[in-house]
Image (tube, grey):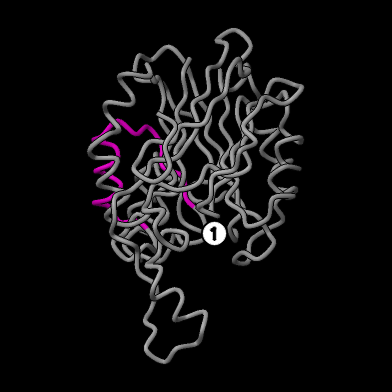
Amino acid sequence: MNILILGDVVGSTGREALKKRLKTIIKEKNIDFTVVNGENADNTGRGITKENSNSFFDLGVDVITSGNHIWDQKEIMTFIENEKRLLRPYNLTKGSPGKGFGIFQTKNKKFKIAVINLMGNIFMKKCDDLFQAASQLKNLVRLRKDADFIIVDIHGEITSEKMALGHFFDGEATVVVGTHTHVPTSDTHILKGGTAYQTDLGMCGDYDSVIGMNKDNSLMRFFKNENAKRHSPALGDATISGIIVEADSSSGKAIKAEPLIVGRILKNF
């Protein structure tokens, strides 16, 4: 089983990179299941629309995860109620539309894959306690009992929350990855219990930027220049960043994990 997980898609340049390359990556890497974090996919870099979501599904994406920007495009609050393949963080305030996890089938119907979306508590929007939510999910979704494979996306600002969550799920999830910071970390490895881990996948966006946003405007904002405008995505060539995990179909645990970086500025092939 080969699983592809991609970091935050940022604006039109990130979407265009997926449009050009994702189907080829899926074919060449023999990918069986694809997850993309889409919370920055709108042209503004904030939120995701129904059109964005459907375009990802058309490219072969199986599930879209999200984070703190999930409600920035208000139309999504209705769409997410009916589209089970679009997730919001499980630990958002109770009563939020949509679901924070789901169990999905691979395209060949052979396997069930659970995808869990969580959000960190530190420097993020208000949400329920991350580790209490993780404890609930560990009991709700069990590896090899409820699902053949389990994918966890922890959308968070700080590395310690993500690392702690990786160890918490070690041996009980196939892969735990972090999203949100838009910077890929070089700590891709398999934990002792057999769970693949990476602190942050980075982004699918233009790296000639400040975390995907126009660098000149970002600098003006940092210098409190009165001419600075609201953040907007950089529009150069995008790099696709993520991870490919090979998992054992009998145990549901990771055999191999390697970063995927395809693009002009950052690239590993």
Say if the magenta span includes residue 56: yes
176 lies above or below 233? above
Q: Which residue is mark 1?
A: 95
In the rendered image, residue 198 lying in the magenta stretch gets the answer no
Magenta stretch in the rendered image: 48-66
Whether 148 is drawn above or below 240: the answer is: above
- State the image coordinates of residue 81 (x, y, percent, origin top left): 39, 50
Identify the residue at image location x=28%, y=62%. Answer: 43
Horizontal side, residue 73 vs residue 159: left or right: left
On-image quarter of the C terminus: top left
Please tell me which residue lies in front, 234 or 84. Answer: 234
Residue 78 in percent (x, y) is at 34, 57
Residue drawn 74% across the image and 48% down it? 131
In the picture as drawn, the residue positioned furthest to the front comes out as 265
Disc 1 packing (10 Å; few <14; some 14–19; many ≥20): few
Q: Can you say whether 222 is above or below 163 in the image? A: below
Element at label 1: loop
Residue at 76% in and 36% down: 168
Q: Residue at x 54, y 26 (%)?
A: 258
User: On the image, which quarter does residue 110 sit in?
Assistant: top left
